[in-house]
Amino acid sequence: MLPEARRRWSRQLDRKLEHLSYRLKLLAFLVCALAVFFVLNTGYSALNTISRLDAVEAERDRWQRSAEVVQALAIKPGDVVADLGCGSGYFSLKLSPAAGKTGRVYAEDIRRLPLVFLWFRTILKNERNIAVVQGDPADPHLPTARVNELLIANTYHELTDSQAILAHVRQSLVSGGRLVVIDRAPNPADRGATGLAEHEISAERVESELRQAQFEIATRQDRFIEKDPDDESWWLIVARKP
C-alpha cells in the first residue's frame, strides 16, 4: 500500500473509531440515566408506600390491642422472638423493642414484597435486631430450638397445612417456649359469602389443632377484640411447648 493511501486509510479508521466511541459513550450515558431514574422512581414509590403503611398501622393501633398482644408473649430482653406471617412488619416492629438490642426478632412471611418493605422499614427506623425470613407454605425456616416466643397474628386462617407449620413451630421453640395465636372469629353474617368469611377461623378449631400438635393451652380469650372496623371479633390463645 502506498504511503498516502495508508495515511488516508488510517485517518478514516480513526474517524470511525471516534464515532464508535462517541456512540458507546452516549449509550452508556443513556443506560446510566435510565438506571438512576428507575432507582429514584422505585425509591420514591417505596417511601410513599411505607408512608401509607405507617398511616394504616396508626389507625390499626386504635383497635388491635397490640400492646396486650406483646404482653401476652411475655418477652424478656435478650429473647429470640418470631413473627410468623409478619407481612410488612406491623407486629415485628413492636416486638423489636421488647427483645432489646441483645435479642432477635425473626420476621417470617412467604411473600417476598412485604418482606422487602419491612427490610426498608427496619433501616429507616434503625431496628437492627430484626431479621427477615422468607418461608414456605409448609416450613417457615426458623432456627431449631432457639425461639423463646412466637406470634401468629391474623395468619393462622391462611395456613394450608397447619399441622406441618405447627410441627416446625414446635421444633423452633425452646422447652417452655410460648406461642400466641390471634385471629378473627367466624361471623354468622359472613356465611355463604366470600371475602371476610375466607379470613376467619374459630378458636375451638385452633385450640384443638394446637393440642393435637402437643402444645399446652395456657389461656384463651374468645372475645379478645369485641369489634374491629369490619364489625368482626377476634380471639387470642396463649400456648406453650411442654
Image (cartoon, helix red, strand yellow):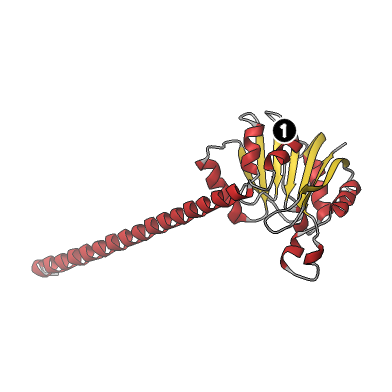
Residue 84 drawn at (x, y percent): 71, 47
Q: Nearer the viewer, residue 96 or 222?
A: 222
Residue 206 drawn at (x, y percent): 85, 52
* Tag 1 residue: 75
Q: Nearer the viewer, residue 70 or 142?
A: 70
Does the rendering let one see residue 226? yes
Above or below, 34 against 207 in this view is: below
Quadrant for the C terminus, please: top right
Mark 1 element type: loop
Does the rendering let one see residue 148? no
Where on the picture, by quarter, is residue 35?
bottom left
Residue 5 drawn at (x, y percent): 11, 70
> Neighbour class for label 1 at 10 Å: few (<14), some, many (≥20)?
many
Quadrant for the N terminus, please: bottom left
Which three-letter amino acid code belongs to the residue tagged 1? Ile
Q: Is 84 left or right of 97, judged from the image as shown?
A: right
